[in-house]
Amino acid sequence: MTLDWLPPDMRPLVEQVTESQRVAATLWAEARSEPIQGIVAVANVIRNRVQHPGWWGKDYSGVCLAPQQFSCWTPEGGQKNYDRLLSLMQLFAAKTAVTDPG
């Protein structure tokens, strides 16, 4: 999975967190203002793409981080949303560095 398309401030954070955290971050950033049905819908999109691999990616991380699939991963998708996601990823990375036994 290449991360060259991600903004430079996001790349190291994505590499430091777990796959579950990448999925959680995608769901949060893409659907946090939606009712539970909207969050489940985004989760289903991710799962369906994993179950039918192709240009979307081969695993959960690959699907969530496929270029131009989920707008939250770049400022072009909305600077305010991107900034919030960046803050969440910084929190995830800090926790992972402290608690993940490796």
Image (spheres, rainbow, N blue to C red):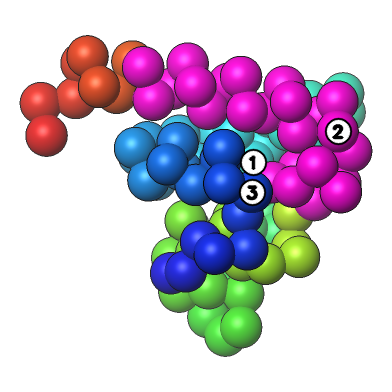
- Measure how far apart labels 1 and 3 are at the Cα level: 16 Å
Find numbered disc 2 in the image and state the secondary structure of the residue it sits on: helix
Residue picked out by circle 3 = 7
Report the residue at 37% width, 46% height from top: 15
Amino acid at pointer 1: Thr
- The quadrant in which the N terminus is found is bottom left
Is residue 74 magenta-colored? yes
- How many residues crowd around disc 1 within 10 Å: few (fewer than 14), some, or many (20 or more)? many
Residue picked out by circle 2 = 79
Q: Left or right: 98 with respect to 71?
A: left
Report the residue at 29% width, 23% height from top: 96
Q: Residue furthest left?
A: 101
Q: Quadrant of residue 18?
A: top left
Q: Earlier in the sequence, mark 1 or mark 3?
A: 3
Q: Earlier in the sequence, mark 2 or mark 3?
A: 3
Residue picked out by circle 1 = 26
Is residue 30 magenta-colored? no
How many numbered dots are placed on residues in this image? 3
